[in-house]
Image: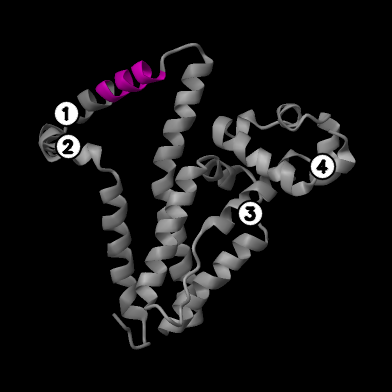
Amino acid sequence: MPRDTLTRDQIVGTAIQLLDEEGLDGLNMRSLGKRLDAAPTAMYWHVQNKDNLVRLAADEVWAEITLPDPYTMDWRTAAETMAVDMYKMMNRHPWLVQAQASHLLYGENKSRHDDHALAVYDHAGFAPAEADRAVAAVFMFVLGNAVGAAANISLRRRFSAKGGDPDTKLTEALDSATEVARRFPRLRARIESAAGTGYNESPSNSFEFGLNALLDGLRGHTTAEETA
């Protein structure tokens, strides 16, 4: 495909698909050009370089998050809706977690999200500085919870690239970690009860518990009258 028939939207959309499938390490102009049936050099006319392409792709996925109306919904429901949507988005695009630590990410969709999040806390009666801290605290909580899924995918890709079986490697590592943990009484008690409680099978419960606790803690900083 000649460069004058390509569009930035096509390139960014295809880059997101490639990133979702192969991660940051799998994104390069050659692979992208192959998917678009275009010369690799044609990409540079639209996105400058790989770093800028990652920035554009990252900003695009921020548009997937629901932005509830803070004037018709109580602040806590609005804040929870945005946080849960952010968590789901980061799990759909696990490369974004890695990109947060390795790239300079910014753009219109990310700024729109952040501005809307501030509006939620502003409307609830948070002082400006407290609203800033609340938005940052929720973002870091969601990002931290998304790291586990992203790391699991990254490890699986690395083990597969080396010709190993990812499930076998992860099972061996988990068994070794469990043996170490058994030396400590509280960890041993939880390991022994985990099978019966199903704790290890429901990691999302930890996210829900933590988010509720965080938002409950922030409730004390509100001055606006809440509606159910």
Is the residue under label 1 in contact with that under label 2 (CB below 8 Å)?
A: yes
Magenta-drawn segment: 166-175
Q: Secondary structure at mark 3?
A: helix
Name the residue carrying label 2.
187
Q: Quadrant of residue 63?
A: bottom right
Quote the CA–CA distance across marks 4 and 3. 20 Å
Vertical side of 228 occupied by 181: above or below: above
**Given the image, on which type of amino acid does mark 4 rest?**
Leu
Quick check: 43 left or right of 27?
Answer: right
- Alpha carbon distance from label 4 to label 2: 55 Å
| Quarter of the image that includes the C terminus | bottom left
Residue 70's spot in the image, x, y percent? 46, 78
Provide the residue designation for mark 4: 6
Local packing at callout 1 (Cα closer than 10 Å; few below 14, some 14-19, many 20+) is some
Q: Earlier in the sequence, mark 1 or mark 3?
A: 3
Q: Are marks 4 and 3 in contact (CB under 8 Å)?
A: no
Mark toward the viewer: 4 or 1? 4
**CB-based contact (under 8 Å), mark 1 and mark 3:** no
Mark 4 or mark 2, earlier in chain: 4
Q: Quadrant of the N terminus?
A: top right
Which residue bears the numbered disc 3? 59
**Disc 1 and disc 3: Cα gap in Å?**
43 Å
Quick check: 24 left or right of 228? right
User: Residue 138: image x %, image y %?
Assistant: 42, 62
